[in-house]
Amino acid sequence: MKYLFLFLSICLISFSASAQKSKKEDKSKKSKYENLSPQARYDAYLQSSNNQKLLGWFALGVGGSMIIGGTAKMLSSGFKDIPKTNIRLIWLPTVGTLACVGSYFIVKNAKEKRKRASMLLQQESAHIGHPQHIPLSYPTVGIRFPID
């Protein structure tokens, strides 16, 4: 009887106990910018920003040309008998529009990286988001007792 009570009490405590997990990060999983000096980190962010900016403008050009080409295909006399809502006529302008919309977000991210790079050289924090809302976590262990 004593062992049954001990087993049940251990089960009750183990099911209601909770703890905050703490992650042990490997060095291989860390960001590629973490182990760099501020100047090297600035250069890496700037290079990444330039690459993303080039990719964004390239996507905008390709998307625009796909829109123009798809519209010209729709208006050509070879496709006069096909309805304008046919997938063969719509896919090219649709993909071009999606590429143009995606290019906006790529260029926007490049501008944010450039801003983060300039903040690094000003000895400011490069935290993303509002600085007053930095989440704090403390390792804790707690026990819950359900009250019904």
Image (cartoon, grey):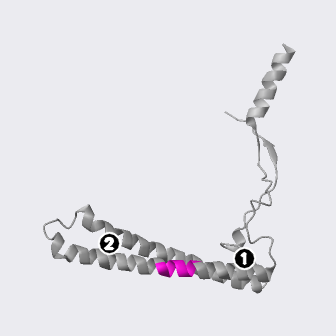
Front-most of 79 and 102? Answer: 79
| Quadrant (top left, top right, bottom left, bottom right) of the C terminus | top right
State the mark number for residue 14: none
In the rendered image, residue 83, in percent from the top left (x then y), is placed at 17, 65
In the displayed image of the protein, which residue is found farthest to the top?
1
In the rendered image, residue 22, in percent from the top left (x then y), is placed at 79, 52
Left/right of residue 66 with respect to residue 132 in the rendered view: left
| Quadrant (top left, top right, bottom left, bottom right) of the N terminus | top right
In the rendered image, residue 65, in percent from the top left (x then y), is placed at 36, 79
Q: Is residue 20 magenta?
A: no
Identify the amino acid type marked 2: Pro
In the rendered image, residue 36, in percent from the top left (x then y), is placed at 80, 75
Q: Is residue 119 above or below residue 92?
A: below
Secondary structure predominantly adopted by residues drawn in magenta = helix
Reading the image, the residue beneath label 1 is 126
Check disc 1 and report its element: helix, strand or loop. loop
Determine the residue positioned at 77% across, 80% down.
Answer: 40
Q: Can the viewer see residue 64?
A: yes
Q: Is residue 28 above or below residue 77?
A: above
- Front tag of 2 and 1: 2
Quadrant in which residue 44 is drawn: bottom right
Q: Is residue 110 above or below residue 145?
A: below
Left/right of residue 138 with respect to residue 84 in the rendered view: right
Determine the residue positioned at 75% across, 63% down.
Answer: 30
Reading the image, the residue beneath label 2 is 93
